[in-house]
Image (cartoon, helix red, strand yellow):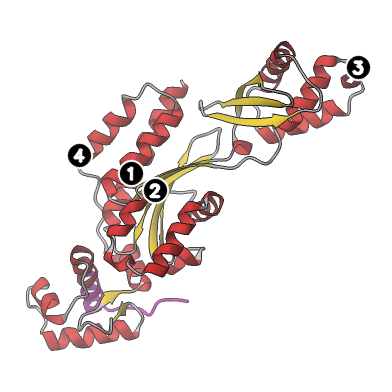
């Protein structure tokens, strides 16, 4: 549905209402709006414009207040054509760069730090979403013998991310058997994505030689289970308690549904993936969310194009009443800094 067009005066009024509401958290009345606009329009004129904006679906009129507040549609117009964009303040940008680039740990530590920085600098929920293992490119694999029939599989991607999974095998294998199998998998399949690895294992499985060669037999048995398609994305999340500080989210039933969505990892991963964009930053507001339980929040998300492991995602989640321009600048900067940091760790 196309939003009704607005004239320049209506656009300026809508912009000022949103800025005041984001700043105060309160519905905006004609008198406070007149002061914000420098008395260039009378309160009566402003009331007429506000009534028209409400009629067109850009404002809402809470029954307990004489003022008005933006709807999801109002925020969408603001984000698309009214707000001003500015880079992240130099002090914040420098602090983020320093904290990420001085890390000497694993990519996992970098993910955790990036999530913390997003939450701390936004005052909202920060997240980093790493693609599931099926989209990763293998650097090496290690196999560790556990009490039969379990084996620990440690897969390291080209970007350095480590994925652990436990599989079960039918035949008991020694650690020496597993080491030989791991060496074969690492030497033959390094640099391949898991889809390609599975295809090669399938070919190997059909070769008669694998029936008589004990190493190849183990490779087929262990590799087939190790590289199965049941992996899922890793999600780093911080700051969910910040949602409790938003007065517009104080409805108990809605808050309970919102926190339930955050607790269900698979569901949340699906939601966040749907809100990511391949190019630049994407903003998903209220009812634009694919999940009904997240219709009270907005997401500002970005992809991190870390070839060859595919695009990773990060962003912030908070009330629809947020400083969208500042959130965009923050998410863009953290995405760039994270990308650079992970490339340096990989090199």
Residue position for label 2:
315
- State the SS at label 4: helix
Compared to residue 35, the image places residue 263 above or below, namely above
Residue 207: quadrant of the picture: top right
Q: Which residue is mark 1?
A: 118
Q: Is residue 36 left or right of residue 219?
A: left
User: Mark 3 = which residue?
Assistant: 212
Of tags 2 and 4, the one toward the viewer is 2
Judged left or right of residue 76, residue 313 is right
Mark 2 or 3, which is nearer the eye?
3
Q: Earlier in the sequence, mark 3 or mark 4?
A: 4
Q: Position of residue 137 (x, y in %)?
A: 60, 30
First to last magenta residue range:
1-15
| Tag 1–tag 4 contact (CB < 8 Å) | no
Residue 100 lies, with reference to residue 230, above or below; the image says above
Q: CA distance from mark 1 to mark 2?
A: 7 Å
Q: CA distance from mark 3 to mark 1?
A: 54 Å
Secondary structure of residue under mark 1: helix
Q: Secondary structure at mark 2?
A: strand
Secondary structure at numbered mark 3: helix
Q: Is residue 226 visible?
A: no
Asked if residue 228 shows in the view, the reply is: yes
If you read the primary sequence from the N terminus, does the residue marked by circle 1 or circle 4 appear first?
Answer: 4
The residue that label 4 is drawn on is 90
Distance in Å between CA atoms under marks 2 and 3: 52 Å
The span from disc 3 to disc 4 (Cα, nearest Å) is: 65 Å
């Amino acid at each position: 549905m196309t939003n009704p067009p607005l004239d320049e005066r209506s656009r300026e009024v809508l912009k000022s209402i949103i800025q005041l509401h984001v700043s105060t958290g309160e519905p905006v009345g004609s008198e406070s709006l007149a002061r914000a606009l420098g008395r260039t329009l009378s309160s009566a004129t402003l009331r007429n414009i506000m009534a028209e904006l409400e009629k067109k679906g850009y404002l809402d009129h809470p029954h307990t207040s004489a003022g008005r507040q933006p709807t999801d549609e109002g925020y969408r117009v603001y984000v698309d054509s009214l707000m001003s964009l500015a880079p992240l303040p130099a002090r914040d940008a420098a602090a983020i760069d320093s904290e990420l680039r001085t890390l000497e740990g694993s990519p996992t530590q970098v993910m955790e730090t990036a999530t913390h920085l997003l939450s701390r600098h936004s005052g909202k929920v920060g997240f980093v979403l790493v693609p599931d293992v099926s989209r990763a490119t293998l650097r090496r694999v290690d196999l560790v013998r556990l009490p039969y029939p379990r084996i620990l599989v440690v897969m390291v991607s080209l970007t350095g991310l480590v994925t652990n999974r436990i599989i079960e095998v039918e035949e008991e294998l020694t650690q020496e058997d597993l080491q030989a199998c791991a060496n074969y998998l690492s030497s033959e399949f390094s640099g391949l994505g898991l889809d390609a690895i599975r295809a090669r294992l399938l070919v190997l499985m059909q070769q008669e030689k694998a029936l008589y060669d004990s190493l190849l037999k183990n490779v087929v048995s262990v590799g087939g289970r190790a590289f199965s398609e049941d992996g899922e994305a890793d999600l780093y999340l911080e700051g969910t308690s910040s949602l409790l500080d938003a007065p517009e989210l104080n409805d108990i039933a809605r808050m309970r549904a919102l926190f339930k969505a955050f607790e269900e990892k698979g569901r949340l991963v699906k939601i966040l993936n749907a809100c990511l964009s391949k190019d630049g930053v994407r903003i998903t507001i209220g009812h634009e969310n694919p999940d009904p339980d997240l219709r009270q929040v907005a997401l500002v998300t970005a992809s991190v194009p870390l070839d060859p492991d595919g695009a990773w995602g990060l962003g912030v989640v908070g009330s629809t009443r947020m400083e969208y321009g500042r959130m965009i600048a923050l998410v863009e900067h953290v995405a760039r800094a994270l990308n650079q940091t992970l490339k340096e760790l990989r090199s």
